Image: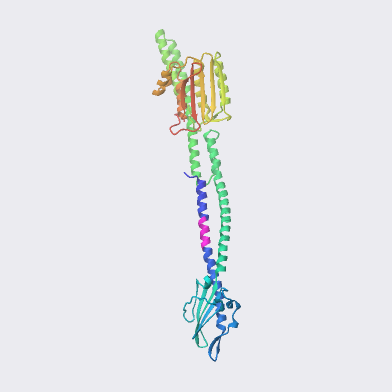
Amino acid sequence: MTSLRQQLWRSGMMVVLVLSVVLWIGGRWVLQGALTDLVGSRLEHDAETLLAAIVKTDGGLMFEEQRIAGVYRRPGSGHYFVVRLPGQIIRSRSLWDQDLAWRETVLGQSHLEEVAGPYGQSVLTWYGSYRKLGQTLSLAVAEDIEPLQSARRHLDWVFILVTVIAATGMLLLQRRGIRAALHPLQEADVQLEALAEGRRERIDQSVPEEVQPLIDAVNRLAHSLLKRVRRSRNSLGDMAHALKTPLNLLVQDIAQVEDRMVREELHRHANRIGELIERELRRARIAGSGPSGERWEPKRDLADLVTVMQRLHPNVRIESSVATSRSRLPFDREDMLELVGNLLENACKWAGSRVALRVRFGSVLEIVIEDDGPGIPAGQRDAFLGRGNRLDECVDGHGLGLSIVQEIVSSYGGEIVFEESAGGGLRVRVRLPLRLSPGAHLSAGG
């Protein structure tokens, strides 16, 4: 979809274009009318001068040519007249051997029109009929309007130039106004990104009133998700403490059973119950990628995690490498510690003497953990990945931790790949996208 900025820019250009065309057409029409009225008024004045030059003599009416302006006596001057008296027609010398278009008019009325004139000129001609000294006479006075048309064309170019400059200024002002109007939305987008990364809990940027309902809806959704995650985690913590005491009492009661085989069987069942409770609690604590808590700082958090694992497994050398310039990544800290912690714990458990941890952050987050242990045969890896079964049910000894890893990776829309390491052990490669994929969803805890 076209951006809002481009839509506003295009609409502004259309408004400026339509306004310019309307002003140009209206301006030409007004100018044409004004010039026509101006020239017509001058022609009518010249007609009155010609009328005054007609005098009565003993032989009838006579035209006194010396009383007219010299421009009418110069051939091709652009000023012409024709006077029709009873029994004679008087033509200006400026016509020479050319004719002037004639139009009959009603006595006492006049007419003004633009016609083709002599010498290929375009002339504006005034026609009128009078009665003087008991005689009816008609006049036609014309003026070449080519200079006026040339001035009008020059004015058109000036108008176009001024319009282009004004339109450019208007568009630049509009662009500045659009930027100013959309600036709050850009700030809201920054806050929305911070909201997604867990660095804030709501968007408090002032936005236009048309967008405010959307911001309010996002704030309500974020608040609801945050409350749900916190409530879920608090409830799970309470449940863990509530189940811990009865389970310990049950274990104590089992220890008092005299039959050794029955006591060992009951111990296995109790341990299985504890594992199942722990697994479901840890699954429910997965926050996915929603605004649920603190963001992950890989260099700081992995250093602490490696230190703890090194103490728990002193016989294994753990090598870690974090290749990212960003101090905080858009992933939930608890989820990442759960994911890396389980993979690292399994690697340390089955490693011979060395475990390597590498974290890279580019278009996706890639976590690679490999050990020099016995590994998993390729046939078994393909089998459990193909069927989509729980890893702890398919690979003996890797425990429930890998099923938790699967849950976390799935909640972020990522992928997990099991390969053979360079030392013959297991290499686990996890890739997580920066954004949720269309099929990704929050877990039960979120």
Q: Nearer the viewer, residue 33 or 301?
A: 33
Q: Residue furthest bottom?
A: 58
Q: Is residue 261 above or below residue 21?
A: above
On the question of residue 284 being in view, the answer is no
The magenta-colored residue range is 17-25
Residue 366 appears in the picture as rendered: yes
Which sits in the foreground, 56 or 358?
56
Q: Position of residue 227 (x, y in %)?
A: 49, 33
Please name the residue shown 45% across and 14% down the image: 251
* Residue 2 image point, x, y percent: 48, 45
| Identity of the residue drawn at 47% across and 14% down | 374
Observer-nearest of 140 and 436: 140
Can you tell which quarter of the image residue 158 is in?
bottom right
Q: Does residue 226 sit above or below 167 in this rendering? A: above
Q: How many marks?
A: 0
Q: With respect to residue 312, does 166 lie above or below? A: below
Q: What residue is shown at x 58% (from left), y 25% (from top)? A: 299
Q: Main secondary structure of the magenta part?
A: helix
Above or below: residue 394 compared with residue 55: above
Report the residue that reaches farthest toward the front: 97
Residue 168 painted magenta: no
* Residue 54 percent coordinates (x, y): 55, 85
